[in-house]
Amino acid sequence: MLHSDSANTPAIEDMIEAFPLPTLVISGAGTLACMNAAAEVRFGKRALGRHLTTSLRHPKLVDAVELSLLDRAPRKVSFQVVENGNDVFYDVHLRAIAGTPLLILSFQNATEVVLAEQMRSDFVANVSHELRTPLTSLMGFIETLQGPARNDANARDRFLTIMSGEAERMNRLVGDLQSLSGVEAGEHVRPKTIIDVRDILQTMLSNIAPLAQDSGVALRCDLGEIPMQVTGDSDQLIQVFTNLVENAIKYGGGGDQAVQISVSVETHDPVLRGPAVAISVSDHGPGIDPIHLPRLTERFYRVDSHRSRQIGGTGLGLSIVKHILNRHRGRLKVDSQLGEGSQFTVILPSA
Ligand code: ADP
């Protein structure tokens, strides 16, 4: 859309119409001369012919446009605005069109890139923090064993037991980080093998039986008689159910409370929009306050960090579950009330 007073080169209008990014042309007088369809969506047709300050409200951007109108130098401005209550980050490129008084501006929404970078640096900070705690403890004990406790056989045995626990914690964390990165790397490759969920659960149950026994938790499992086929990666699905049942034992076990594993077929899952297999793991533990539920599958998110660390949690188990289920086009549903236990349900499309 070209504003008749401000530019006399319809060719520019055709050119910018081919750009997918919102693109504006500013006249030498600082008015909005023309814009492509993508810019029209963002700024509205009424901005045409008006001075740039009425539509480009960000002071950084207005300053850059005014400078480029004067010195004709190309510029890039990055700024942040709030749109519909969300932070949005823009990179705007400014360039003078040679032989004309015009200035061309293209708007790139850089929000995803900025947020990905923020997530990456948060992740590195979290991993460093998680590793630092056991490492500091190990270093402290090594120093003590080299110094004051050098000849104290009792202290040495006690400290070595603690050190071995700390080293195991680091080992678990590194193992979970490797699983997570492996799962993320293959998340876009759909599994191809048709498997029966009941076979997966049988394998998981025999792997986890020793932990359940040591923790004094009974596992009740009703697998039914009907085959329940899904297209999946056996090892990854075993990991999903192992993580969920391990959590049920760790957080929900205690006393003589049992953990119940149930399987059912759904003729139509409203979210997956098709037939599905639902596998639920229920415990009678303390439950989870609903305010935590939306964030539960974030990496390193824990309801009670102290308790999680105390029982050997890495804070990555449910995040691994989420990524594996994404790869399987499945979903995780969590139902929990404080004081009433928790139910984690995995829903997978039927094969
Ligand atoms: P963690 O290694 O800390 O167990 P997860 O990602 O497996 O990490 O779980 C994240 C958090 O979710 C846990 O720290 C715990 O607070 C909560 N949680 C998971 N499963 C249960 C459960 N069955 N009952 C109560 N809280 C749970």
Image (cartoon, grey):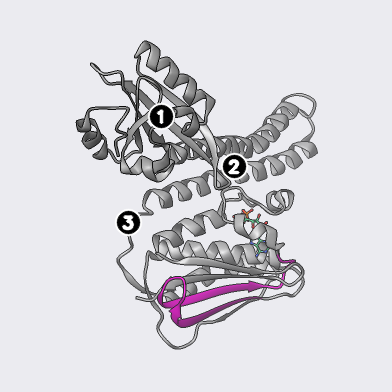
Q: Amino acid at mark 2?
A: Met
Q: Position of residue 36 (x, y in %)?
A: 31, 39
As drawn, the residue found furthest toward the front would be 5
Query: Is residue 269 depicted above or below 225 in this figure?
Result: above
Q: Amino acid at mark 1?
A: Val
Secondary structure under badge 1?
strand
Q: Which residue is mark 1?
A: 92
Q: Earlier in the sequence, mark 3 or mark 2?
A: 2
- Residue 323 part of the magenta segment: no
| C-alpha separation, residue under disc 1 versus residue under disc 2 | 44 Å
* Contact? badges 1 and 2 (CB < 8 Å): no
Of residues 263 and 220, the one nearer the viewer is 263
Is label 1's Cβ within 8 Å of ligand 1? no
Q: Please give the range of residues in magenta.
A: 259-287
Can you tell me which quadrant of the image ligand 1 is in?
A: bottom right
Location of residue 162 (image quadrant):
top right
Q: Residue at x 74, y 72 (%)?
A: 340
Give the foreground label among 1 and 3.
1
As drawn, the residue found furthest toward the left would be 11
Q: Which residue is mark 3?
A: 189
Query: Is residue 216 depicted above or below 39 in this figure?
Result: below
Location of residue 30 (image quadrant):
top left
